[in-house]
Structure formats: structure tokens, C-alpha cells
């Protein structure tokens, strides 16, 4: 049975490809989902993809993943820098967590340099564009298959 991986995207990522393409690129979230789904099949992973502009929805998704997933890739968007609640939810998850950011947050505004999610993440990928999601899946494939 394939290990299940949950990809979670936070606020405004539904506008990927339309919002600030100079920072986030021209690929849409549907493009990212298609690329990740194809790679997951190659890696022998079962993939679930989720996006919400609401903190509670993200927390509910993390809670649901506790019983069904071996790993989470999370791009919490702006909640990265503000949400202790998402950190607390991730701390209830016993699988692997990879934090993923499309832009290099360390080259941006100072407030983006702090991440609550990093306190739980097993790894952080930032600045590789949407390819970062695929890098995260490759790493999770290594971690969950031992």
C-alpha cells in the first residue's frame, strides 16, 4: 500500500499564477497539483491536495491527516509567520512534515524571516519556485520508505 502524503496550501495560494507572478511565477495551483500527482505516482505515493484561505480549515486538514497520512508538505502562506494554532496542530501529527515556500522568504520583508511552522518541520524548502513541492515529495518518499 502506498504511503499517503497530504499537501496543504494556505491563504492566497489559490491565486497562484495571477498574484504577483514576479515573485511566485506563472504556474497555477492546478499546475502544481498536476505535477505533484504525476511525481507521486512515480514515487509510489498516494497524494491528497488541499488549499484553504481559512486557518481553521488548515487545522482540520492537519487533524484529519493524523490518522491517514505518513507525511505532510505544507505551504502555510502568511500563516507561517503568525499561526501558533497551526504549529500546535502540526505538533499533534506524528508523521514527517516538510515546510515549503515558493519564494525565498529570507530575501523578502523582515517579518517573513520568522516561521512558527519551522519549529515542527523536519525540513524547510524555500526559493525554488513551485519545484519546491516536488523536492519536498522526493524527500518525503525517502523518509517514509526508510
Image (tube, rainbow, N blue to C red):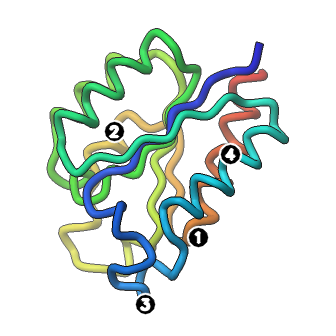
Q: Quadrant of the N terminus?
A: top right
Q: Are marks 4 and 1 in contact (CB under 8 Å)?
A: no
Q: Depth check: 7 or 101 in front?
A: 7
Could you give the CA–CA distance between mark 1 and mark 2, rounded to whole angstroms? 21 Å
How dense is the environment of label 1, judged by Cα within 10 Å: few (below 14), some, or many (20 and up)?
Answer: some
Could you give the CA–CA distance between mark 1 and mark 3, rounded to whole angstroms? 14 Å
The residue under label 3 is: 22
User: Quarter-wise, where is residue 74 in the image?
Assistant: top left
The residue under label 4 is: 37
The residue under label 2 is: 119
Kindly report which numbered mark, 3 or 2, lies closer to the viewer in this rendering: 3
Kindly report which numbered mark, 4 or 3, lies closer to the viewer in this rendering: 4
Vertical placement of residue 135 versus 45, above or below: below
Could you give the CA–CA distance between mark 3 and mark 2, rounded to whole angstroms? 29 Å
At 46% across and 15% down in the image, what residue appears? 94
Vertical placement of residue 45 versus 112, above or below: above
Q: Is residue 60 left or right of residue 120?
A: left
The residue under label 1 is: 128
**Residue 109 location (% of width, % of height):** 23, 79
First in sequence: mark 4 vs mark 1: 4
Amino acid at each position: 500500500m502506498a504511503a499517503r502524503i497530504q499537501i496543504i496550501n494556505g491563504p492566497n495560494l489559490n491565486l497562484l499564477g495571477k498574484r504577483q507572478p514576479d515573485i511566485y511565477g506563472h504556474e497555477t495551483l492546478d499546475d502544481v497539483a498536476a505535477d505533484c500527482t504525476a511525481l507521486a505516482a512515480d514515487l509510489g505515493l498516494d497524494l491528497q491536495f488541499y488549499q484553504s484561505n481559512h486557518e481553521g480549515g488548515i487545522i482540520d486538514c492537519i487533524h484529519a491527516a493524523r490518522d491517514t497520512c505518513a507525511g505532510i508538505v505544507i505551504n502555510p502562506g502568511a500563516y507561517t509567520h503568525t499561526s501558533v494554532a497551526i504549529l500546535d496542530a502540526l505538533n499533534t501529527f506524528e508523521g514527517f512534515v516538510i515546510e515549503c515556500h515558493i519564494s525565498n522568504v529570507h530575501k523578502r520583508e523582515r517579518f517573513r524571516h520568522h516561521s512558527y511552522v519551522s519549529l515542527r518541520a523536519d525540513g524547510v524548502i524555500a526559493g525554488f519556485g513551485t519545484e519546491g513541492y516536488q523536492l519536498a515529495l522526493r524527500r518525503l518518499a525517502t523518509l517514509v520508505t526508510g
